[in-house]
Amino acid sequence: MRSLIDIQDLSPAEIDELIQTANDIIENPKKYAEVCRGKKLATLFFEPSTRTRLSFEAAMYELGGNVLSVSSGGSSSAAKGESVADTAKTVSCYADIIAMRHPKEGAPLVASMNATIPVINAGDGGHNHPTQTLTDLLTISREKGRLDNLTVGFCGDLKFGRTVHSLISALSRYTGIKIVLISPEELTVPGYIRTDVLDKNGIDYVQTTDLMSVMPELDILYMTRVQRERFFNEEDYLRLKDSYILTPDKLKSAKADLSIMHPLPRVNEIAVAIDDDPRACYFKQVFNGKIVRMALIMKLLEVHA
Ligand code: CP
């Protein structure tokens, strides 16, 4: 039985296989319509979500399976003090696979150690978000035709941005990757990302506060939201929230084939005017998220088309 807690739980070969399955699902959706008939996915979300929870649920329905859902901590016995471990043991009696989002870093790992069914980390605090990374890798693969030899700029809240941490970790296993980290001084990536991921894997990277100075070299610009919910005081959030706002004039120096990505939700960091730019990929990411989660559910349940 396999769980997915960290993107490193999957080898690059397994990620390639998931991308191939996802591409086949897009081409031949009817082939997959019954593969999870009789199976149940439990979505346990103790933190708000639109895309991740609904895409997991849509994915399971499109595979012919069913869904049980806890959509907020307040609506489950977690509100009465039940532990993550007991919740995982309980839900193992009702479902075949769990997707869990939790504000505490490591909670999905604890769930996986106590569940008797696969557990998928659907985002834990400011730590990791491996299925967003699968979404991002599928999107990059479909947009660029490759996952190597790319200059990728991450812009915004790189300190608390779990999607950033997971995607940097995934990209560090491909050749010819250059990472450009663009953030205010207060929101740089955590030290362990620099030492244990970038330095350890010999990845070429730079840090800057100036988006415009690096724009011309980027193949991918991965924008992120400054996350109000992770700040300890409102004053800091208000000071930093509009550090980077991407507008059409700022794209004048960008490559013609730049891919503009964002895990969403967006607040103010990408002007709506950019949505019609052919380089905007963030709503393609939303679609790809459902498809790659279908491929992942199949892999962890060991079902085949
Ligand atoms: N990208 C993402 O995790 O979105 P949600 O918070 O809406 O699930």
Image: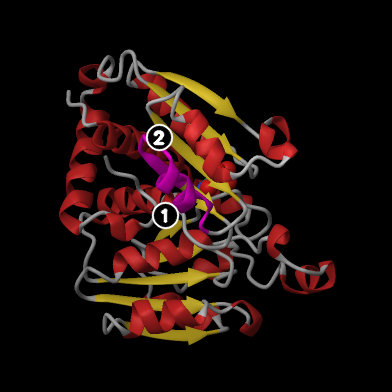
Q: Where is residue 102 drawn, in percent x and y? A: 58, 48
Instruction: Determine crowd level at label 2: few under 14, some 14-19, many 20+ residues with C-alpha closer than 10 A.
Output: many
Q: Is residue 100 left or right of residue 173?
A: right
Q: Is residue 20 above or below residue 241?
A: above
The residue closer to the viewer here, 162 or 287, is 162
Residue 117: in magenta span: yes
**In which quadrant of the rendered view does residue 270 lie?**
bottom right
User: Where does the C terminus fall, quadrant-wise?
Assistant: top left
Q: Is residue 158 above or below residue 230?
A: below
Q: Is residue 197 left or right of residue 19?
A: right
Q: Is mark 1 within 8 Å of ligand 1?
A: no
Q: Where is residue 160 drawn, in percent x and y? A: 59, 67
Q: Where is residue 201 drawn, in percent x and y? A: 27, 80
Q: Is residue 48 above or below residue 251?
A: above
SS at mark 2 in the image = helix
The residue closer to the viewer here, 182 or 71, is 71
Q: Which residues are magenta?
A: 106-121
Mark 1 sits on what residue? 279
The residue closer to the viewer here, 285 or 49, is 49
SS at mark 1 in the image = loop
In three-dimensional space, the C-alpha distance between marks 1 and 2, rounded to whole angstroms, equals 21 Å
**In which quadrant of the rendered view does residue 98 lie?**
top left
Mark 2 sits on what residue? 290
Q: Where is residue 122 drawn, in percent x and y? A: 48, 45
Of the residues shown, which amino acid type is indicated by label 2? Lys
